[in-house]
Amino acid sequence: MKKILFTIVALLSSWIADAQYTFQDSNNQDVLRITRRANNDSRSEIVIPQVNGYNVYKADLHSHTIFSDGKVTPEWRVEEAWQDGLDIVAITDHIENRPYVTRLPKYLNGVEVQVQNEKEISVDLNASVRLAQDQARKLNMLLIPGAEISRPYKTVGHLNALFTTDNNAIPAEDPLQALRNAKAQGALVQFNHPGTGRTSLDLTEFEINAYKEGLIDGIEIFNNNGFYPKAIDRALEKGLYMSGNSDVHTTTDIAYSDATLSRNITLILAKEKTMEAVKDALVNRRTIAYGFDQIAGEESLIKDLFNACVTAEFVRVDSKGNTIFNLTNMSSLVFAASINGSNPHWIAPFSTIPMKIKSDVIELKILNMWCGEGKHPVIEVKL
């Protein structure tokens, strides 16, 4: 009797477990669907509280599609960004480097692509942004139009023009003139991956002249797997916004398989998710760069971000006079904190860690936050 009862319970448990993972297709009763694949277009949310009354929007201001040297369509670039938990994405296809355009049909979704040869390609430089707009609207994503001005690394480098109105009006033989053309239509210019193809981050003659004319507004601190601490100091010196971006050409699943979050991102502090509000945030340098659990920005701003994410709660004073308290992180970010000079503690997302110190003063040095080359913010915690 016990054996029969055990069999019935086992079968019932199996049926309940099976029911949780499969369902019968409503259009074809002979087909079972797997529940976990029913919503395969799901979004991974990145939770960050408001900072100083501003919403914190997650953005990628540097990405590529098949209209330059990327391997995915403009529509997929937007879909992928939404799945990765972003609110904002910029498509910034190269102006000068478009090898994949030669493989496109003459007409792609109504956009004419004229190809003479590998070296002489004529294509509407606004095409990739235009093709992505419908998908951005469907997913409530803010799509920032842009283009990448790509010249030799050692002498000029690569620069993104963002918030452009007509990418076809940007090209010029003189790279400074190309920047002027972008700025003339209200664009912001971002210096990309400043260490690529160089032996140092020293300014080139081109950069000196570009800064002198006020042609550069921002700089990447993180790009792909590159981290440029010296660029933080330059941003502070030149009054530039700081960004962290993927520069993704393949898919972020491939490019960021080792990342805690899905990709490098720029945290943008703005009142609303509109082109005007986001541009205002960049102009006024309300941005924080993120890449592979490292966070960079102006000292006061990244301190405010930490204080918005992490709270300290007094618990008790033990018999030996130690202060016991809890640190709680209510965000998707992680923080490495050295407390009063101790070995660093890892504060994981949505977690609480108990702490014990022999002092009434608590100073947290956040080692994965950067406010300059080799400089980390120190935050005094009040219990």
Image: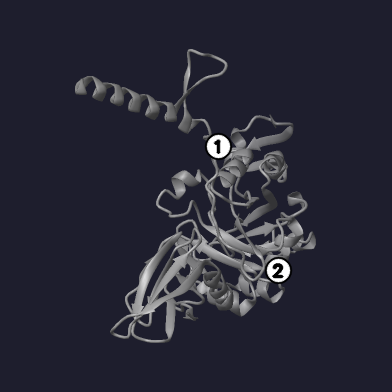
- Horizontal side, residue 185 vs residue 370: left or right: right
Identify which residue is drawn at 38% across, 82% down.
Answer: 340
Q: What type is the residue that disc 1 sits on?
A: Asp
Identify which residue is drawn at 76% across, 60% down.
Answer: 276
Q: Dot 1 lies on which element?
A: loop
Q: Which corner quadrant holds the N terminus?
A: top left
Q: Position of residue 43 (x, y in %)?
A: 55, 44
What is the quadrant of residue 51 in the picture?
bottom right
- Horizontal side, residue 71 vs residue 351: left or right: right
Which residue is the extreme one toward the front?
1
- Horizontal side, residue 216 vs residue 227: left or right: right
Asked whether residue 200 appears in the rendered view, the answer is: no
What is the quadrant of residue 347 in the picture?
bottom left
Label ID, residue 283:
2
Asked whether residue 259 appears in the rendered view, the answer is: yes
In the image, residue 180 above or below residue 139 = below
